[in-house]
Image (cartoon, rainbow, N blue to C red):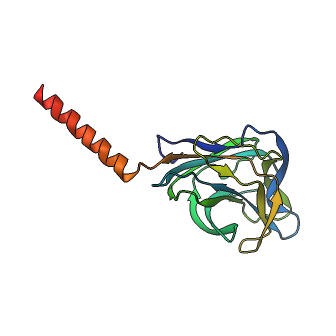
Amino acid sequence: MAGNASAIVLVSNLAETTNSVNTVGSVGGTNQFQYAVPFTTGANGAGYSLANVTLDLADANGTPSNFQVELFSSGGGDPNASLLVLAGNSNPATAGQYSYGGTFSLAPNTSYFVVASAGAVGGVNNYRWNNTSSTNESSPDGWTIGTGYFRNTGTGGSWTATDFPLKISVDASAIPEPGSAALLLLAAGGLAAARRRT
């Protein structure tokens, strides 16, 4: 799993009760459903370093393939452009919580999307991402998860917003403010000098 070793969970709704599932992949016909859930970062002035995101998934239908999780920017309130493909299990076919990692600098007080997609298979072959009817979340730093999810019926198509947030958590670490980093360096230098004198 890629990511920052000092990262902590900065927002999560994984503890909330599952309401239903969303199908990532094909459900018959030609549609290939993508799903996205927004989150907004806290107010740390220097931003945050993303480590990983965790998705709560149900058992897959059929034999889907090539599950992919990406970080997207937000544009006009919708998922806009892919910023990073996160590394993790490309075939999460059994129910569980799956983590996908990658390093990216997140701006403060900014919305992003976690987007999941699957390969084009046809028929009823899809992964299933749990959602919740609860809008509760836990965050030690003022992060939030959106109150609904977004659906796209094909890559490059338009996004439709719907109630019920998908179940995720986001791990990241706060990037030290420049002044804080300078103080830490001064303190380290002073400690080293004191040790040389003894």
Q: Position of residue 130 (x, y in %)?
A: 79, 47
Q: Quadrant of residue 184?
A: top left
Please say whether residue 62 is visible from this viewpoint. no
Image x and y of residue 76, in percent: 68, 71
Residue 69 position by quadrant: bottom right
State the image coordinates of residue 94 (x, y, percent, origin top left). Answer: 76, 42
| Count of numbered labels shown in the rendering | 0
Q: Is residue 198 above or below residue 56?
A: above
Which residue is farthest top? 198
Q: Nearer the viewer, residue 56 or 149?
A: 149
Residue at 11 percent across and 29 percent down: it is 197
- Expressed as whole percent of the image width and height from the top left, the position of residue 185 reads 28, 44
Q: Quadrant of the N terminus?
A: top right
Q: Is residue 177 above or below residue 28?
A: above
Residue sitting at 71 percent across and 47 percent down? 92
Most extreme residue toward the left is: 197
Residue 38 shows in the view:
yes
- In the rendered structure, the answer to whether residue 197 lies left or right of residue 127 reads left
Residue at image point 75% right, 74% down: 157
**Near-viewer residue (15 or 59):** 15
Residue 6 to residue 177: above or below: above
Q: Please tell me which residue is depicted at 72% across the width and 55% down the height of the picture.
A: 146
- In the image, 184 versus 58, the foreground residue is 184
Instruction: Answer with left or right where residue 163 lies relative to residue 196.
Output: right
Q: Vertically, is 125 above or below 174?
A: below
